[in-house]
Image (cartoon, rainbow, N blue to C red):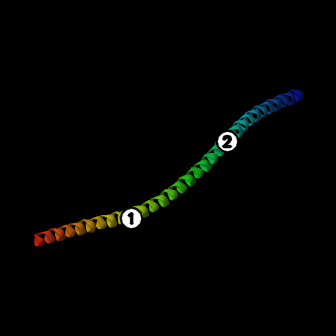
Amino acid sequence: RGGGAQQQQQQQQLVEIENVEIHLEERSREIDRIAASVNDMAVVMKDIAALVVDQGTMLDRIDYNLAEASKHTEGAVVQLKQSDTRSRNRTSFYCILLLSIGCALMFLVLLVKLLF
């Protein structure tokens, strides 16, 4: 009887060892799945980092282009003001010229009238 109890205890230990081995294999597979998920996540994070860098570069270019457009707009405003001033000066000149010619004609008409 003592040998039968010992044999039954050994079988029970073998069953427990098999159960532990099954649990270890399951845990090992789960750990492998988690490791694969972490690797996938690392790839996604690298891709996001690259996108952030690219977008930062685009924002820098947009900022530079806006600054350049602002400079060109300020230059255009200065040129428009100069053009407006010149245009007004020319208009005044032509007005004065036309009035002078008109006065000269009136003077000639007056002279002709007085002489004849």
Task: Please tell me whether residue 1 is drawn above or below residue 59 in the rendered image.
Answer: above
Residue at screen point 42% across, 62% down = 79
Kind of residue sitting beneath label 1: Lys
Numbered disc 2: secondary structure:
helix
**Place of residue 53 in the rendered image (x, y in percent of width and height, measured from the top left):** 62, 50
Most foreground residue, 112 or 59? 112
Residue that carries the numbered disc 2 in the rendered image = 43
Most foreground residue, 63 or 35? 63
* Residue 44 placement, left or right of 96: right
**Place of residue 110 in the rendered image (x, y in percent of width and height, measured from the top left):** 14, 71
Kind of residue sitting beneath label 2: Val
Q: Of the residues under marks 2 and 1, which one precedes in the sequence?
A: 2
* Residue 3 placement, left or right of 49: right
Q: CA distance from mark 2 to mark 1?
A: 57 Å
* Residue 9 placement, left or right of 70: right
* Discs 2, 1 touching: Cβ within 8 Å: no
Q: Quadrant of residue 31?
A: top right
Most foreground residue, 77 or 83? 83
The residue positioned farthest toward the right in the image shown: 3
Q: Quadrant of residue 21?
A: top right
Q: Quadrant of the C terminus?
A: bottom left
- Mark toward the viewer: 2 or 1: 1
Residue that carries the numbered disc 1 in the rendered image = 81
Numbered disc 1: secondary structure:
helix
Most foreground residue, 80 or 85? 85
Q: Quadrant of residue 7?
A: top right
Say which mark, if any, is on residue 106: none
Residue at screen point 87% across, 30% down = 6
Residue at screen point 43% across, 64% down = 78
Residue at screen point 57% across, 50% down = 58
Task: Please tell me whether residue 1 is drawn above or below residue 90 in the rendered image.
Answer: above
Q: Residues within 10 Å of mark 2 (few under 14, many from 20)?
A: few
